Image (cartoon, rainbow, N blue to C red):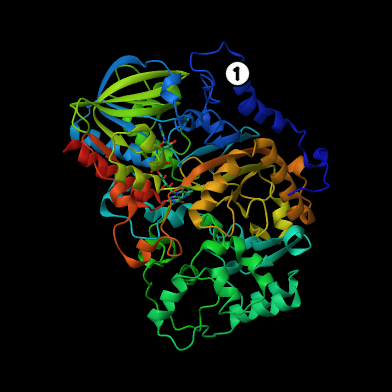
Amino acid sequence: MAGPVRDRDLGMDRAITRRDFLNGVAVALTTALAPPRWLPGWEVGPAVPGSYPPALTGMRGSHDGSYEVAHRLREPGFWDTVGAPAATGERYDLVVVGAGLSGLAAAHHFRKAAGPRARILILDNHDDFGGHARRNEFTEGGRTFIGYGGSFAIESPAAYSPAARALVSELGVDVSRWSSVLDHTLYSSRGLRSGVFFDKETFGVDRLVQAPASAGDGEGAEDETEEKDAWPRFVAASPLSEAARAGLLRLVRDRVDYLPGLDAAAKKARLARMSYAGFLTGPAGVPRDVVPFFQARTHTLYGVGIDAVPAQDAWGLGLPGFEGMGLGDRPGPGMNYDAIPNNDAETYFFHFPDGNATLARLLVRGLVPAAVPGRGADDVVTARADYARLDEPGAPARIRLQSTVVRVAHRGPRGRGREVEVVYARGGKLETVAARRVVLACWHSVIPYICPELPAAQKEALAFAVKVPIVYTNVLLRDWRAFERLGVHRVHAPGGFHSSFNLDLPVSVGGYRFARGPQEPIVLHMVRTPCLPGHPAREQHRAGRIELLGTDFAAFERNIREQLARALGGGGFDPARDIRAITVNRWPHGYAYQYNSLFDRFWLEGGPTPCQTARRRFGRISIANADAGAYSYADAAIDHGLRAAREALS
Ligand SMILES: Cc1cc2nc3c(=O)[nH]c(=O)nc-3n(C[C@H](O)[C@H](O)[C@H](O)COP(=O)(O)OP(=O)(O)OC[C@H]3O[C@@H](n4cnc5c(N)ncnc54)[C@H](O)[C@@H]3O)c2cc1C
């Protein structure tokens, strides 16, 4: 979002920038100035010895230094440029690649079955554990504020499996407590509701309008009731053209059958093959300028806009236009899991202040007790993990961070050797360990590069899993008075750099207390999903990833400050004064790709799915990760971690 606002007005010169600079760029600079290593160009991440990763601000998520080695693996001749790895002499019963929920669940199950003396090593390329289940911390006025840098909540559109539920409860998490830890009325009692920010580049004028909950992306609107005249009032206050307003009102209010003459099954089959954007401008006949209003509504779930989301899914998601179509209440073939309403699944919900990072921290506590002090799922919320204890010689289970695995191969005949050699890059050098069993709980797209001995069909299936790029930005605000004045706590911004932002969910657990009033600091959560409308979903994800890796922290910071100034300026928001810290959790490889009836014929017409081929066990190597289920939820990560551990034990 380019604009005339000067850097100083935005606060680009504020101390926070320096702090982020120190955390993000300066450390990389220090490493660049260090004497060249024997692997030129290999960087180490921003975490310096003794640093505490959750409290690092600036560019986080897949931070600089975490992905360069893996990307270099794609270059032909990679192995010619590196020397022979150094053997550590370490031997493990199980080596897990990837310290996300899947890898941690696999290690947890293996240890439980094989006994506490089983030797386990978990390797991950990041400077923090948890994978997408990532914790952010901020300190302001002596208080700690916690945010989620990735995986938001224990929730799933499909029911949690008995095994995943058993693990959650074994970790001490009682999801039935959810309503007792959430302050249901904090925002609504102050008249704070949903809002839509129309930006002048897309809609001709900057305008924030209080909106019906169903006009946003649904995130965090559980407790909002929608008044009867909410839509007409919203539409009248919007800057949309007369024709667009009329078309929009007709769409949300009138019960029209836009595909007359077809039965419900035939309608669903048609809707599964057209995008929601195509439905709007085609059968529903709304003016073209309504499309930008809906374009980003599916970003937070699908990572793409309505040009790449099937109309049948839009029906399942509750988007307007289907009320009069007689589609019944049963999903049609090819619907995305996210679009299939499931009341049972919806009651299984819990959000910790750091999201599912709490699950990761509880799993790590079980594996390496010295690293995460305390007992139970309440005190872990405020516990400070000791990163120096994660990888101690002599400990049965170890977690080795900033270690990118570059090769996993059976020693001996292909797929049949008696042990597996795992080679990883750490601190600019290659090291090897030996394992009786390996679980690859990393992203599937990297596996063909690190495990070339896999069958060609399996490698092709693994490569199909193109992850969805997504950014969760957390901004620590001095207070939330501007939100109160404007009467909003969550804003959908269809044309914005971040397509939505919301004040944190008011949750108090264990010793952690949420802000009680608008005068207190608060974490603002913002979501961006870079994509390239008009192309098939997986192409959009690839393009979004390239764009994301080419956007530096300064560009993020400027966009964040400008977007918030423009959206909230009417409430007195001053980015230079009110923004205290920014953490951009960049996930170029974010959600697992979920199949889409517009682009994946097998998903609509039946037949084996790529993930079934991708996750086949190969000799001593088992394959986990949420990609193994083509399902972007924590329960898929857990289920496939547990399945891979069972394979490793067999
Ligand atoms: C922004 C975001 C929000 C989400 N919100 C929710 C939610 O609210 N609820 C929900 O249920 N699910 C949510 N999900 C999905 C859920 O969090 C994930 O499905 C789950 O955490 C994935 O766990 P995983 O272990 O399969 O993969 P990951 O968490 O991705 O872990 C895999 C790890 O392997 C590492 N790795 C990759 N290659 C290598 C290599 N060569 N060497 C070493 N390590 C490697 C990766 O860096 C990563 O750390 C969200 C996901 C994202 C990205």
Residue positioned most to the left: 650
| Residue 216 versus residue 530 in the image, above or below | below
- Residue 534 pos. (x, y %): 58, 60
- Residue 193 pos. (x, y %): 63, 63
Q: Disc 1 designates what residue?
A: 32
**Viewer-proximal residue among 410 and 487:** 410
User: Does the image show residue 462?
Assistant: yes
Instruction: Judge left or right: residue 396 versus residue 506.
Output: left
| Residue 400 versus residue 453 in the image, above or below | above
User: Does the image show residue 150?
Assistant: no
Q: Quadrant of the C terminus?
A: top left
Note whether ligand 1 is within 8 Å of mark 1: no
Write down the quadrant of residue 395 in the picture: top left
Quadrant of the image where one finds ligand 1: top left
* Residue occupying image coordinates x 36% and y 39%: 376
* Residue occupying image coordinates x 40% and y 53%: 177
- Residue 547 pos. (x, y %): 60, 44
For the residue carrying disc 1, how many other residues have a C-alpha within 10 Å: few (<14), some (14-19), or many (20+)?
Answer: some
Q: Secondary structure at mark 1?
A: helix
- Residue 6 pos. (x, y %): 83, 42
Instruction: Judge left or right: residue 175 versus residue 62.
Output: left
**Viewer-proximal residue among 296 and 566:** 296
The amino acid sitting under disc 1 is Ala
**Viewer-proximal residue among 89 and 177:** 89
Write down the quadrant of residue 298 in the picture: bottom right
Callout count: 1
Residue positioned most to the top: 35
